[in-house]
Amino acid sequence: NAGVTQTPKFQVLKTGQSMTLQCAQDMNHEYMSWYRQDPGMGLRLIHYSVGAGITDQGEVPNGYNVSRSTTEDFPLRLLSAAPSQTSVYFCASSRYGDSSYNSPLHFGNGTRLTVT
Amino acid sequence: KNEVEQSPQNLTAQEGEFITINCSYSVGISALHWLQQHPGGGIVSLFMLSSGKKKHGRLIATINIQEKHSSLHITASHPRDSAVYICAVRSTGSQGNLIFGKGTKLSVKP
């Protein structure tokens, strides 16, 4: 199993450009999420989804959009990149439901994004 | 005040030492996770706990629900244990979302 596949690994954008970070999982997980990791701070939730067609905002959603048209894919879109969005981004997935407390979170390998 | 606090922030140990990393939280939880992030950046799940104690190889995780505290222990530490260890809690009613601590950076010297 590939697990959680996240692309690209590195990206440099100019202010105002748009881009999509891709995330795909092959474990049939209902729950998928996007985080950003900044120095001195814990991982912060951007958006999450508990199933196809269902998305919701996390702690820091401004400037980002998501969609979940299939169980497997959960892309993150930056509509107009800003230097404040320079960060490392992680996608993660897990099972969801009554037994979700017993479900580990599987992470992608991360995307290092720089906005100049 | 952060809902999940880890201590220490940084830890340097000699190979072979017994290591303890602490995590305190202030919310009601359904589960607590310990994660490991290696210098290359990848994050892997080490443990999930809702009560008691779990052991995997040289790693031991404990949780005290009443005191809202968890510890991660590493016995006979090795340089390959050098990583950032992250505590995260799944709060009750959070739709499965995790709240993360800032991490503890561990460096084990040979």
Image: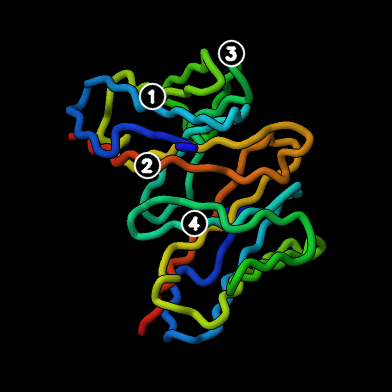
Residue type indicated by callout 1:
Gly
- The residue at which mark 1 appears reads as A63
Can you tell which quarter of the image residue B38 is in?
Answer: bottom left
Q: Earlier in the sequence, mark 3 or mark 2?
A: 3
Residue positioned 33% across, 39% down in the render: A111
Q: Is residue B37 above or below residue B74?
A: above
- The residue at which mark 3 appears reads as A53
Asked which secondary structure carries label 3, the reply is: loop
Res A112 visible: yes
Residue positioned 58% across, 76% down in the render: B20
Residue positioned 74% across, 61% down in the render: B68
Dot 2 surroundings within 10 Å: few (below 14), some, or many (20 or more)?
many
- The residue at which mark 4 appears reads as B102
Residue type indicated by callout 3:
Gly
- Looking at the rendered image, the quarter that the C terminus of chain A falls into is top left
Numbered circle sitting on residue A91: none
Residue A18, given in percent of the width and then of the height, sits at 27, 20
**C-alpha separation, residue under disc 3 versus residue under disc 2:** 24 Å
Asked which secondary structure carries label 1, the reply is: loop
Tag 1–tag 2 contact (CB < 8 Å): no
Can you tell which quarter of the image residue A95 is in?
Answer: top right
**C-alpha separation, residue under disc 4 versus residue under disc 1:** 23 Å
Residue B28 shown left or right of residue A23 in the figure = right
Tag 4–tag 3 contact (CB < 8 Å): no
Tag 1–tag 3 contact (CB < 8 Å): no
Residue type indicated by callout 4:
Lys
Residue type indicated by callout 2:
Gly
Dot 3 surroundings within 10 Å: few (below 14), some, or many (20 or more)?
few
- The residue at which mark 2 appears reads as A110
Dot 4 surroundings within 10 Å: few (below 14), some, or many (20 or more)?
many
Farthest front residue? A1
